[in-house]
Structure formats: C-alpha cells, structure tokens
Image (cartoon, rainbow, N blue to C red):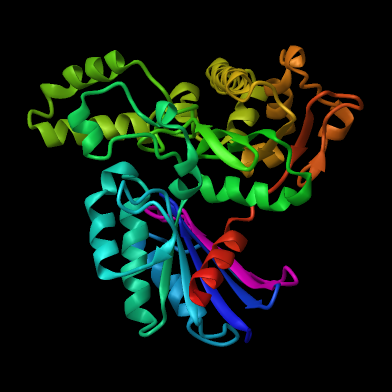
C-alpha cells in the first residue's frame, strides 16, 4: 500500500479538532494535530503542533462562528508543510436509523444526516457543515464519516428501546449513544489485554459511561441525544420527564409558539444545566475545583452530584455485565482529575474496585488500582483520530 496522507476533522459543539496522519502498510504516523476552541466567543484558541510537539501556531483569535473557525483550519492545512490529503475522515455522533455504519459520504447520506440533526443538535449541524465545506475545498478527495453510534449498534434491543408509543420507535427514536469512537479506541488499545467485562468512563465536558462485554457495547448512558445519561458540563443527564414538562409549562407564556418553547427548553437542558447549572460558576471541572477550594458550596454540590451519578451507573453496569474485570477512565476529566477518580471509586470497594492513592497521583496512561484489587483500574487517553484513520483506510481499500 502506498503512503496515504489522511486528514481527520473531529467537530464538537464549540470546537474543531483536526489531525493529519500518514498511513501505510501496518503503520499510522501522526504528522500534525491542532484545534480551534471557543467557537462563538471573542476569546478563541487556535493551535497546531507537529509530531515532535513543537507548536507551529498558537493564537487566541476571535472565533465568532463556525465559518471563521473552519477557515482557520483550512487556511492552515491547505499549504506547506501539510500534505494534500488523499482522503478525509469525519466524526459524527449519530446518523439515525438508516446510517448505522461508517461509510463514504454521498449526497444521499448528507441529506439523511440533515434529516436527523435533532438526534445530536449541538454537534450534527457543525459536523455536516464541515463535511460539505471539505468536499468543496478539497475537490475530488473522498470524504468518509465515522459514527459514534456504530460502536453502540450491538446494544440489545431491550436496552436500546424507550418505553414510548411504537409510532416514535418507527421514526428512529431509540438509544444511539455517543463517544463510540472513543470507546472503540480503548478496546483497540487494550488489544490482547481486553477483559471480558469492561466499564469505560469517558469524562469530559461531555461525559458518558459504557458497559462492554468481549469488546462489544451492551449498554451506554447517553440516549437518543448526548443530553441523556450522566451529568455533563452543561447538560442535565437523565432527568424525570415531569421536570421537563414543568419547565416547558413555565416558559410557555414567554415563548408561545411550540418551536420557540422547544428551542428554549433545549437551551436550558443542554447549555445551562449540568456542572454549570449546579455550580453557578463554570462547566469546567478545573474551575469548579478552584472555586471549591475557596469554599464555594455550589461547586461542592456540583462535584457531589457528578461523582454520585457516575458511581450509580458503575453499579448498574456491574449488574448488566454480571461482574467487572476492568474499569477505565478516559477523557479530559477522567485522565487529569485525580480527585474525581478518588471520589468516584470511594465506596465501590464492595464491587472489587480498590484505588491506590499513590498510583492514582498521575496524569495520562497508568494502572491505578491497588495491588490485589479484584478489578483492575486504568487511565487510558482516547485515540479517536487513529481509529478514524483506520476506518478510512479500510473503506478506501474496499
């Protein structure tokens, strides 16, 4: 196989991450990586570094919208020293019931993704925008989409369905999950060390948990959209539907049309809740910890709620799996916040989860379980871009 430069574009609700890989027979070499953060603000961050970790760009431009953010990326990667890509890979949360597997992007696939933006309203619009722009800016270069939902397509029907009228099930309303490529990358990195019963906690501004048996997802915390599951930076996580109805009725007088009220409700549960809503300070765990150290009671409650619901899900998935062999922390909080890992594992000793405080005092890949712990506890950074490159190469070859 010849050497293939592959561009990976991984968009979030307020960021665009990207990387350039060189793929050849059995080898994947990351040449460059970068990101634009803070989309929608006048205090954005734009950086690029090479394989040696040297910063090529480190700026703080205003990034008022996605157009400005993507222009920063394309202006940079369209010229030397970046190789012209032979293929482009994109991450997307979910494409709906008709798009369940990674595939080459076609006009028909894009139209279907457009019809399903409500399944990930904070992520899908910018992802689709970037796909269309990439096809325009790199004419003739094949684009591929990798769905988080593909990894979760193995979830049993009883766990994937909601107890709602069949008419909505027929419309594709079901559990799709998210962070699937991250979870798949953990399975990939574990390789021969992959246990039969595994729980992975992907903890960042977006947070979720997945139960994995023999490398296959059997349940995951996020549902139809990434708003469900555990508390995230700005999202409620699972919530009594009655609370949603109460809020909807409360805002109905100010937002009298159905769509306006629904938009406002979405803003409340997806952008103003979670760690931000409880702490009244920030959606960033680092800021919350800083305010907590100064005695902020609201930040204390935010941390308590966050870690409590994660412990509850770990207990539930322990039951789903019929036991547990390994617990993995990944994502920004999972990899870097040692105290959060302590708070989560505290009280789970009866499940065989025993953390070693000294080993836990680490950031990045490590085994942090106590000697003799029945459950091995690890920290493993995700490798989403690498997995996307692998899928792109496989699809190119086929």
Residue plotted at (31% across, 47% down): 96
Residue 353, percent from left and from top: 76, 22
Residue plotted at (59% across, 49% down): 184
Residue 320, percent from left and from top: 57, 22
Question: Residue 65 sits in which quadrant?
Answer: bottom left
Q: Is residue 351 visible?
A: yes
Left or right of 101? Residue 204 is right
Q: Main secondary structure of the magenta part?
A: strand
Residue 187, percent from left and from top: 66, 47
Left or right of 9? Residue 356 is right
Question: Residue 249 sits in which quadrant?
Answer: top left
Answer whether residue 341 is magenta in the image.
Answer: no
Q: Identify which residue, 50 or 311, lies in the foreground.
A: 311
Question: Residue 338 sits in which quadrant?
Answer: top right
Q: Identify which residue, 39 or 114, lies in the foreground.
A: 114
Q: Residue furthest left?
A: 257
Answer whether residue 32 is magenta in the image.
Answer: yes
Left or right of 247? Residue 143 is right
Q: Which quarter shows the N terminus?
A: bottom right
Range covered by the magenta-colored residues: 27-56
| 178 in relation to 197, above or below | below
Residue plotted at (71% across, 28% down): 341
Residue 190, percent from left and from top: 74, 48
């Amino acid at each position: 196989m010849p050497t293939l430069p592959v561009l990976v574009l991984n968009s979030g609700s307020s960021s665009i991450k990207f990387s350039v890989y060189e793929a050849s027979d059995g080898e994947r070499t990351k040449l460059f990586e970068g990101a634009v953060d803070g989309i929608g603000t006048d205090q954005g961050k734009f950086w690029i570094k090479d394989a040696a970790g040297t910063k090529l760009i480190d700026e703080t431009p205003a990034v008022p919208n996605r157009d400005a953010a993507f222009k920063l990326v394309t202006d940079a990667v369209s010229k030397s020293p970046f190789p012209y890509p032979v293929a482009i890979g994109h991450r997307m949360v979910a494409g709906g019931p008709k798009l369940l597997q990674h595939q080459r992007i076609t006009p028909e696939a894009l139209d279907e993704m457009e019809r399903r933006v409500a399944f990930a309203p904070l992520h899908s619009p910018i992802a689709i925008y970037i796909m269309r722009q990439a096809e325009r800016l790199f004419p003739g270069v094949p684009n591929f989409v990798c769905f988080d939902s593909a990894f979760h397509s193995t979830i049993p029907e009883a766990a994937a369905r909601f107890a709602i009228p069949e008419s909505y099930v027929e419309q594709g309303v079901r559990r799709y999950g998210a962070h699937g490529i991250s979870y798949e990358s953990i399975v990939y990195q574990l390789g021969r060390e992959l246990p039969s019963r595994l729980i992975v906690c992907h903890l960042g501004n977006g947070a979720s948990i997945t139960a994995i048996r023999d490398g296959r997802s059997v349940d995951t915390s996020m549902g139809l959209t990434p708003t469900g599951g555990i508390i995230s930076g700005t999202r409620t996580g699972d919530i009594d539907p009655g609370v949603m109805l109460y809020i909807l009725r409360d805002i109905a007088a100010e937002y009298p049309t159905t769509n306006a009220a629904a938009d406002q409700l979405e803003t409340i549960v997806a952008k103003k809740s979670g760690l931000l809503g409880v702490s009244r300070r920030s959606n960033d765990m680092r800021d919350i910890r800083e305010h907590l150290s100064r005695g902020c009671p609201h930040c204390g409650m935010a941390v308590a709620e966050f870690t409590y619901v994660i412990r509850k899900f770990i207990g539930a998935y322990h039951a789903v799996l019929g036991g547990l062999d390994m617990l993995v922390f990944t994502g920004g909080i999972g990899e870097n916040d040692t105290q959060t890992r302590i708070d989560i594992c505290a009280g789970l000793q009866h499940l065989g989860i025993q953390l070693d405080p000294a080993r836990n005092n680490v950031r990045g890949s490590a085994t942090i379980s106590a000697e003799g712990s029945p459950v091995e506890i690890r920290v493993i950074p995700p490798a989403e871009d690498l997995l996307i490159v692998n899928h792109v190469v496989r699809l190119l070859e086929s």
